[in-house]
Image (cartoon, rainbow, N blue to C red):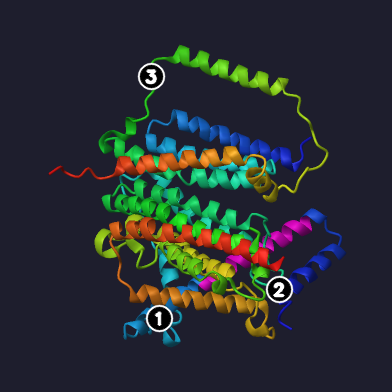
Amino acid sequence: MGENLFVGMAKGLRTWLESNHFLPIVTDVFLMLLAVVGVLGFLFLNALFLIYYDRKFGAWVQARLGPNRVGPRGIFQTVADTLKLFAKEIFIPNNVDRWPYLLAPVLIFTIPVMLFLVIPFGKGMVPYDLNLGVLYLVAVTSVETIVLWMAGWSSNNKYSLLGAMRSVAQMLSYEMPVIFAMLSVVMMAGSMKLSDIVAAQQKVWFIFLQPVGFLIYFIAVNAEFKRTPFDLVEGESEIISGPYTEYSGMNFALFFLAEYTNFMIGAIMVTTLFLGGWNAPFGWTFIPSWLWFIIKMYFVITLYMWTRWTFLRIRIDQMLNFAWKFLLPVSLVNIFVTGVGLYLYRMIRW
Amino acid sequence: MFNGEVIAFAIVAFLLIFSALGVVFMRNIVHSVLFLAATFVLMAVTYLMLDAGFLAGIQLVVYAGAVSIMVVFAVMLTKRSDLHETNLFNSLTIPGAIISLLVFLGLSWVVVKTPWNIAERPLVDPMAINKIADLMFGKFVIPFEVVAVLLLVALIGAIILALEVKPQK
């Protein structure tokens, strides 16, 4: 019943618009804008909830209360915080490099929003089913480094610059394992299209066929999106908060939002590549596909939060060594084994 | 003539040339590199408009993604105090102008002389990479492997250069 809720709504709207003799281009543009609004709404609502969930989960892990004053069980705490950030003055320090300083928060939020273009949210619910989906994700994410660097450099603050340098080192070293783990999935699915990858997992999820790939991806994505134990870029106890140090008000809020959006993208990618995307497990199709997607996404998010509140922050040399001397060789071996395995499988089947 | 494609191309081309000029005319080397990143991204957009999605993706990963390293080096290799005057002009205006004019004329000559075959419709699915893979691992497998060996040599060389020199006992 709920399965075709969103697809049906879009279809109904299209027929209504067409029956009212709008120009075809007007219909297309209107529906596209609606998809954008839908994605942004999904993003904001989830980010709003995620911040609350993160704080509550952390409080639970550490046996304290967490936010509990605003609304029942503190559920409106994030709303109050957001309103506060809206009302705050945007404070620009004296000697910042003005243009890059003001552009960075805008750009840093644009990039993760762009990633939502190719995500299959449910059966037939892809904003744009790009043939090169995986490559698109890798390509767009790689631009993020320079934007974060821009923020850190233009702030004219040594802590910002240190954080920016760290972010460059971190993103570069962890991009490789991420790409290689994605590649092993692409090899098994035989396509870079995300909807094809989801379809290939209809019977067996790739986490069972690619357990090593899953572990590499899970760790490396955590590092790429800079969550504890890999949050050296911010490292509050060492460098205040890295590239975000000099930002205030809505500028800071945009960085914060981008971080949670990235977090969400990470969970979504793990879901799509390894946990079967919107496919229902055990044939439980009475729960609609988009709801399965959200359930799996929140499962992965909870795993990441568990990691965050369990592990300590590691040192920068440990982090780089881990990427280059452990994750990279393992992912290369994984690709090799996957290739040989696929070849043997094909030979046996013939 | 003035359909959406042409207008979009005009906008992108204008921005592309603007940021390319920014790379040359900015006096601060970090600003130059930021404009360079913008140039690379806009070039990827141009590739997309030419239906070369794979190339656009690679352009983003290889150029726009790695350009941040260049910024890091730019900052590490220059003194912070005089970063505002790090990308200076020299006095060789006339030889520079002659060389750029020659390059421009040469490129224009090539563009005009090439017989362009205009296809009525796209020959392959613009976003398909299977054809690229077939060519890379079939017809052009030897150049591909040679490039791979070359990169490996560069990688090993970089590691050897970066190795710590142990004090001799």
Q: Quadrant of residue A292?
A: bottom right
Disc 2 element: helix
Residue found farthest to the left: B169
The quadrant of the rendering that contains the C terminus of chain A is: bottom right
Disc 1 element: helix
Give the number of callouts: 3
* Identity of the residue drawn at 83% across and 55% down: A23
Q: Position of residue A222 (x, y in %)?
A: 43, 65
Q: What residue type is labelled 2?
A: Phe
Depth check: give the residue in front, A105 or A122.
A122
Report the predominant secondary structure element of the magenta stretch. helix
Q: Which chain carries label 3?
A: B
Q: Which chain carries label 2?
A: A
Label number found at residue A57: 1
Q: Mark 1 lies on which chain?
A: A
Q: Which amino acid does label 1 sit on?
A: Phe
Left or right of A322, for residue A112: right
Determine whether label 2 and label 1 are within 8 Å by CB: no
**Is the same chain shared between marks 3 and 1?**
no
Distance, label 3 to label 1, CA atoms, is 60 Å
- Residue receiving disc 2: A6
Could one spot residue B127 in this view of the protein? no
Q: Position of residue A80 (x, y in %)?
A: 43, 74
Label number found at residue A348: none
* Identity of the residue drawn at 34% across and 76% down: A310
- Residue receiving disc 3: B90
Determine whether label 3 and label 1 are within 8 Å by CB: no
The segment highlighted magenta reads A26-46
Depth check: give the residue in front, B96 or A131.
A131
Q: Which amino acid does label 3 sit on?
A: Asn
Distance, label 2 to label 1, CA atoms, is 31 Å
* Identity of the residue drawn at 68% across and 69% down: A199
